[in-house]
Amino acid sequence: MEPYKKHESIAALMNRSNVDTDQIIPKQFLKKVERTGFGIHLFHDWRFNEDGSDNTDFELNKPAFKDAHILVAGDNFGCGSSREHAPWAIADYGFNTIISSSYADIFYNNCFKNSILPIIATKEQLASLMDEIAANEGVRFVVDLENQELTTPAGNGFKFEIDPSRKENMIKGLDDIGLTLTHIAEIDQYEEKHKQSYPWLWA
Amino acid sequence: MKKTMYEKIWDSHLVVEAPGQAPLLYVDRHLMHEVTSPQAFEGLRLANRKVRNPHSILATMDHCVPTKDRDLPIADPIAKKQIETMADNCQENGLNLYDMKNPNNGVIHIVVPEHGFVHPGMVVVCGDSHTATHGAFGALAFGIGTSEVEHVMATQTLPQMKSKTMLIRIDGALSKFASAKDIALAITGKIGTAGGTGHVIEYAGEAITKLSIEGRMTLCNMAIEAGARAGLVAPDQKTFDYLQGREFAPSGENWDKALAYWKSLPSDEGAEFDTIVTLNAADIEPQVTWGTSPEQVTGITNVIPAPEDFDDEIKRQACENALNYMDLKAHTKITDIPVDLVFIGSCTNGRIEDFRIAADITKGTKVADNVTAIAVPGSYHVKQQAEDEGLDKIFIDAGWEWREPGCSMCLAMNGDELTVGQRSASTSNRNFEGRQGKGGRTHLVSPAMAAAAASAGHFVDIRNI
Ligand code: SF4
């Protein structure tokens, strides 16, 4: 996995709450058997008109947000289905950071598996960030994962919380499976005990 | 220390808690379908890893499968490839797959309990958010992403953060015609779609104990709609009776051992929960969603709210957007909302009990003009059972379509979908924009409410028929 340390980028604003994974990547695009190529379908139903042209009313189609790697969005982002196609599409489109006041659990977990940093802001912090972008579209934020700090030109930055193990894995770009397999002896041991305690599961 | 059921299951599945790393939890059962697994198998192959315990896996094909003309090849070439990839992956890794032609085929969360594959006290995962369904047996069951599917296949474990616990107690008895679905919707209405975030819910109280196992599955199924990771109901005699004799249930001496363990699982008297929510069962009337989120829901005797009814700015805006998308006016009576299509099915309400109650209401009626009504059993076993009881005839005589099993209109991936502007009464679990087809408008209801809407052409209070 791509290590994540410090990033500076344009922050795009999506002032909507409860953005669900059905919108992030509509189900007609879930039939592929590969992991890549979902970015062109990100927010499909909002992003494109019936005839396939860009919907210029959709916020991410604003020229100012074109090269954004940071997405600032409303509360309860990523609710709904567990599809990992949602973070795949977000990453493939080019975002590596999301800032919101809360996320749905499964989506939040899925982000870390795909080198996307989901930053949790308080409602007030989020509101100031949104105001800052709205007043100055194209503004660049700096995300420093090592120091758990977001900085913005207008001074709306803050220190954010993140689980230490997740932070470590992200900074090092460690693959979860490899990490777990360092505990293979413990897993074997557990399984032996499990067979004794719950023999019916192994019958 | 007094423990909740969640804590008991967590503690007994903890493999290792290394400093600076998320605790590793052991996984007993892994369920699979064609949409969220192909990239996980690809990952395994690329890393040269093997499935650690093929016997822990049960797989089906449900999301993309056609519900009619099953003997014809799948028309959509990408869906066809996904189905074929699933079959290849299962064969290559020696996994138990109920493919489209298998008499055990159906929606994963319907099929798994039918075979007794999940027991109380297990940790169960699936690349599907409605895995929470299996909490009805007192198993810790939750949805995971595709990377995690790969992780579980390779290691039989999952790094997990411990959740908070929420007790939802429903006191008293449900009124006639109020069902598990109405409880689930009423809860989502009360606590919101983010109300359970970070929590595992345990449902308790008289109304829950009285629910059948099917009803408990419907309830736990929608724990995710309230934002929770999982839902749990304490196992009791009904649970044991349901499991006994099923294919993957313990038998003989093992049954007694298992039973003793299962009986130790319910939360200890006085165990503490992080959050407690209570509802009065008698207050829960048949529910209908009016918006584009499961929390935008109300009772059948109510009217659609207006944006001004909400104090919270976000909720006000959401109400306005929803009314716009749904093409509904504030203060309209719920019973005045017309429907174009009625769908009974899905892992929420595609079980035999659901078709029995819907048939009961449908008997002797006709589907209203301009309404299409589709009944999609959750599995071939449900279909067979319904046909043995003559339920299919009741639906067909009333003008319903009686289909082959699958997810179908629940997420409209298989070609069964709403057209732009069409309005459905649906027994599924999500009413998001476009969920049942781009521009389609979904109202979530119970099977009884759906059946009544099919013949009336609009929502009706089933307590009056
Ligand atoms: S029936 Fe619907 S919710 Fe259930 S597994 Fe299928 S698509 Fe998912």
Image: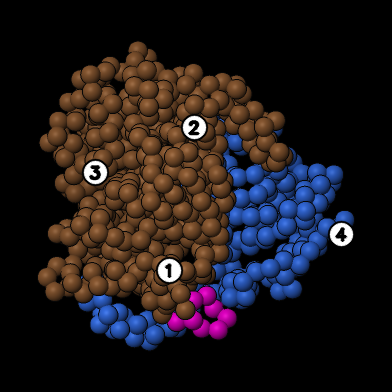
Cα distance, mark 1 to mark 2?
A: 34 Å
Q: Amino acid at mark 2?
A: Gly
Quadrant of res B245: bottom left
Report, in whole angstroms, how far the alpha carbon at label 1 lies from the one at label 4. Answer: 51 Å
Kindly identify which chain the residue marked by label 2 belongs to.
B
**Residue at the disc numbered 3:** B379
Secondary structure beneath dot 4 equals: loop
Residue B90: x percent and y percent? Answer: 26, 59
Label 2–label 4 contact, CB within 8 A? no
From the viewer's side, name the closer residue of B7 and B338.
B7
- The residue carrying pointer 4 sits among few (fewer than 14), some (14 to 19) or many (20 or more) residues within 10 Å by Cα, namely few
Badge 1 marks a residue whose secondary structure is loop
Residue B142 falls left or right of residue B251: right
Identity of the residue furthest to the right in this view = A154
**SS label for mark 2:** strand
Q: Is residue A194 above or below residue B296?
A: below
Which residue, given by chain and number where applicable, does mark 1 sit on? B269
Residue position marked by numbered label 4 in the rendering: A155
Q: Residue at x 29, y 38 (%)?
A: B354
**Chain B drawn in what color?**
brown
Relative placement, left or right, of B328 versus A135 is left
Comparing marks 1 and 3, which lies closer to the viewer? Answer: 1
* 10 Å crowding of disc 2: few (<14), some (14-19), many (20+): some
Q: Give the residue type that dot 4 points to.
A: Gly
In x, y percent, where is residue A154? 87, 56
